[in-house]
Image: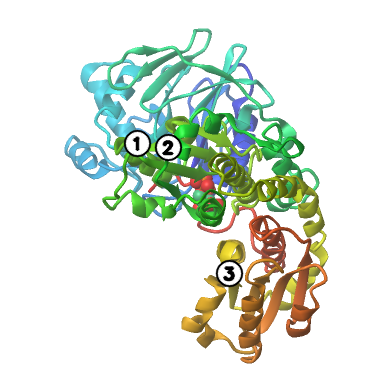
Amino acid sequence: MCGIVGYIGHREAYPLIIKGLKRLEYRGYDSAGVVLYDGTDLKLSKTKGKVSDLEERAVKEISLNGSIGIGHTRWATHGVPNDVNSHPHLSNSGNLVIVHNGIIENYEPLKKELIKRGYVFKSDTDTEVLINLIEDVQKKDNLKLGKAVQVALNQVVGAYAICVFDKQKPDEIVVARLGSPLAIGLGKDEFFIASDASPFIEYTSNAIYLEDEEMAIVRLNKPMKVRKIKDDSLVDPYVQELQMNLEQIEKGGYDHFMMKEIYEQPNVIRDTYRGRLHANEGIVRMAGVEDNIEKFTNAQRILIIACGTSWHAGLVAEYIFEEFARIPVEVEYASEFRYRNPIISDKDVVIAISQSGETADTLAAIKLAKEKGAFVFGVCNVVGSSISRESHAGAYTHAGPEIGVASTKAFTTQITVLTMIALRLAKIKGTLSNSEYHRYLLELETIPEKVKEALETNEISKQIASVYKDAPNCLYLGRGYNFPVALEGALKLKEISYIHAEGYPAAEMKHGPIALIDEQMPVVVIAPKQGHYDKVVSNIQEIKSRSGKIIAVVTKGDEQVRALADHVIEIPETSDALSPLLTTIPLQLLSYHIAVMRGCNVDQPRNLAKSVTVE
Ligand code: G6P
């Protein structure tokens, strides 16, 4: 979490840093700050609140000139979000300044030691400890900044992406990474530093992504050097050509990124299967799968590891893999998996699902799985992300940048990738009949058009939202493939509208949640025709007889549920296994509209961050 931006070159740094921080606000938005060197001194402005608050404050507080600067948008870990705890942080001498994304776990003993040595601290942050540690090291041995950063980082336990500079030497920025992402954009006589490439895509399409335990010194008019923090060895960095474009990271006429991303789903699902799915020829192929096909076909078990919405996509995949490929699947929260003593062997295939590819728990879990001998396959959206690099192989979802904190298109594209893998394995293992296999391939190809049709439920979703926007609670029920969709629907509602919502397998309602049902309780029931339709209809009747308000997501033309429900949302017909790709759409729209009507910040819900790089 937290976004960092740095610039050194010939442009004015301030507007570039502010614009970059806005693009990184998905990473955290509790507080923001910027520091510039204007040729005479450091100009620092920081504040609790969003980058727009920083802009208001900075213009009154500091001169905005300077062509070297660093900025930060924060998701608080150590210390409440207030002005003092905001980054950048200065060292005691006032010469060194830092922005940091991550956690210094051993900051307490380091802080105690520094206090003994006369250092004083203004904030409660671990970051202020780090910058003073760097200063202490620098002073003790009269080291250059780069060396001092390196020595200090070797004393640190935790995770970091940092930018540091010294006002006495304002022609270089030192950057380093362990566990938190850091990209360096390479311009002509200028460098851009950021947590991802979005802040600088209009300036350069060449970037280096630092690997863990690497640091770099970016200097004006000098070639950049990348080194290993531990042993000081020089690294030859790989310069990546960026695929992102500006349009992808702007709202494109929508009020919110979330809505734009919901509406992108027909196209991005198509992008996900493009070149991989050839339904008419009966082919589905992904290089990462083909290159490791025996690992998959010999797998005694597939273990899916993920967090949040990605975990829900994993649950859908569990049903799909077991049905199509007859391989046993377990789905685990990465945060639980890593802290027990899981039984894993080299016969297991671990699939790590992550939109950002940076989620700390998922990353740690796959490292553990690798240590235990498992083959790790990553399903990530962000190209070049840590999880994609740490995995033995993988498949990208190609959903394009997802900026709204509530995940939408990542979910449906993850399911698309996982469905394709399951179909490929089913073909090889003969676990689906030829006709079933072909039917699914053809059906998957029609999904983008059907998602488009499902998006036509926007108006009805909005009307329903206006009825229930003030509800304090909401239940989501689904069975089989649509049980994870119920979980995802509830998560969408709670994270952006702050309405308490729970998802349940419809039949489990009888074991507790039914006690909550009265005439005030909206219950969203996912009841497409395929699957366990009759059973779900019985569950709807149970809710109705207790006066619950029923919002049913049904297959077009379903009159039976229409007669029972208070509201119906009709989606196109598809097979049971592919139905989550459609049933999830109206649930995304419903949460979106409720959140907007409640005046919530849809793209940046309170307390959340898009990329959770702390455990
Ligand atoms: C955060 C985000 C969620 C996301 C989860 C996992 O909580 O707010 O939208 O599902 O992290 O993130 P990942 O990038 O690993 O999919």
> Of 114 and 523, which appears nearest the observer?
523
Label 3 is placed on what type of residue? Arg
- Indicate the secondary structure of the residue bearing disc 3: loop
Label 2 is placed on what type of residue? Val
- Indicate the secondary structure of the residue bearing disc 1: helix
In the picture of the structure, the residue carrying the numbered disc 3 is 479
Occupied quadrant, residue 14: top right
Question: Could you tell whether 454 is left or right of 385 in the image?
Answer: right
Residue 37 visible in rendering: no
> Of 284 and 193, which appears nearest the observer?
284
Badge 2 density bin: few <14, some 14–19, many ≥20, Cα 10 Å: many
In the picture of the structure, the residue carrying the numbered disc 1 is 370
Say if mark 2 contacts mark 3, CB within 8 Å: no
| Mark 2 vs 1, N-terminal side | 1
Q: Position of residue 68 (x, y in %)?
A: 54, 23
- Indicate the secondary structure of the residue bearing disc 2: strand
Residue in the image at 66% along x and 40% along y: 399
Label 1 is placed on what type of residue? Lys
In the picture of the structure, the residue carrying the numbered disc 2 is 376
> Of 297 and 557, which appears nearest the observer?
297
Q: Position of residue 322 (x, y in %)?
A: 51, 54
> Of 213 and 485, which appears nearest the observer?
485
Badge 1 density bin: few <14, some 14–19, many ≥20, Cα 10 Å: some
Say if mark 2 contacts mark 1, CB within 8 Å: yes
Q: Is residue 520 above or below residue 62?
A: below
Q: Position of residue 7 (x, y in %)?
A: 55, 24
**Between tags 3 and 1, which lies in front?**
3
Q: CA distance from mark 2 to mark 1?
A: 7 Å
Q: CA distance from mark 3 to mark 1?
A: 34 Å
| Mark 2 vs 3, N-terminal side | 2
Question: Could you tell whether 336 is left or right of 512 in the image?
Answer: left
